[in-house]
Amino acid sequence: LGLVATVWLVDCNHYVLRPDPALDGARVGYDVPLDPASPWPKFRADARQSGRSAVRPARSDARPWTFATGKGVFSSPVIDAEGTAYIGSADHSFYAIRADGSLKWKFLTGEIIDSSALLDDRGRVYVPSGDAHLYALDRESGHELWRFRAHTPEQVEALHDIELFNVDWWEGNVAMLADGTLLAGNDNYLYYRIDRDTGAERGHWLGNELGWSLPAVNTRTGRVFFGSMFIALRNLFAFDAESGEKIWSSGGLGSIVSSPLLTSTSADGAVVVGGFDGYVRAFGQK
């Protein structure tokens, strides 16, 4: 329909988010190798997905701005220390937008982008697209460093001896393990572990439906937790990051597309997640 979507920075009271000056150089103590200077380097901010950031509102005279993309914007932005926002659009492009609202660069993929990206500590941004590729881009220039292609549905069926009814789009977001390995779920039922330097697959976990739920990572116990679109009871999973072993599966009576929150990195902590049945549930991590 030729609709134009707009990214808004709206601030009627002229407040902006700035790093807390009490922080040492505005560096954040992430327990995975995210960009340590970024206040929001991934969806839900950190490995256990607390949704907390070391920024506070500060009054500013800066003018709000808008930035128009070619179609709808469904992904959430990630933000670097300079205030540059990185966000995808249904117009197939991924954008780096400076703090003043000007375009720094854009990168064209082969399909819509409704996933959030991830900023690491090596100056890269990782972008999933509906064209079945996950891209690694140089954050300064936007140049492609590598791309990883998800398995086709036919390849998954042959590999795991299952019947698959979905596609190979990336519609979830990107997470990270303590050693820098990327984690990303695909519509082909697979949750991938990908080497961030080479783009090579380090293995994958088999879910049972669309993988939109972003994995939460307990870096102390080495366990990873994520949901699936499966309709009932078996739509939340716990895996061991090192061995790849499935620890348990559980769930509720509705699909889980939301991203789990870990209340702590203690083995006795909880996994909190909402489902399509209208409930928010807490599960033991063990």
Image: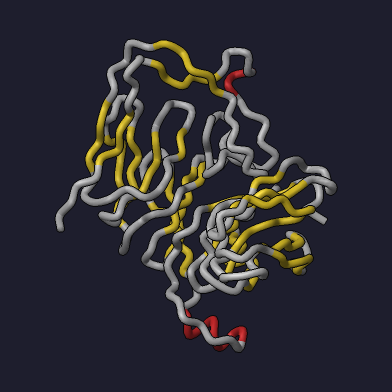
Residue 238 horizontal side relative to residue 187, left or right: right
Q: How many numbered dots are placed on residues in this image?
A: 0
Tell me: 164 left or right of 94: right
User: In percent of the image, x 43 and y 64: which residue is there?
Assistant: 133
Which residue corresponds to the image point at 24% horizontal and 51% vertical from the top-left?
71
Image coords of residue 114 (percent x, y): 39, 54
Q: Can residue 23 be seen in this snapshot? A: yes
Between residue 46 and residue 182, name the one nearer to us: 46
Vertically, is 65 above or below 146? Answer: above
Q: Residue furthest front?
A: 278
| Residue 186 to residue 52: above or below | below
The image quarter containing residue 68 is: top left
Of residues 208 and 106, which is closer to you in this image?
208
Q: How is the image coloured?
A: secondary structure
How far across and down, in percent of the image, does residue 261 sit? Answer: 65, 46
The spot of residue 205 in percent (x, y) is: 65, 69
Q: In which quarter of the image is residue 160?
A: bottom right
Query: Which residue is rendered at x = 42% and y = 28% of the image?
Result: 83
x, y (%) of residue 243?
78, 65
Position of the N terminus, as image quadrant, is: bottom left
Note whether 89 is above or below 240 in the view shown: above
- The quarter of the rendered structure image containing the C terminus is bottom right
Q: In this view, does 190 lie above or below 51?
A: below
Which residue is more in the foreground, 3 or 158? 3
**Would residue 177 be visible to someone looking at this image?**
no
Q: Residue at (36%, 50%) from the top-left corner?
A: 74
Furthest-left residue in view? 2
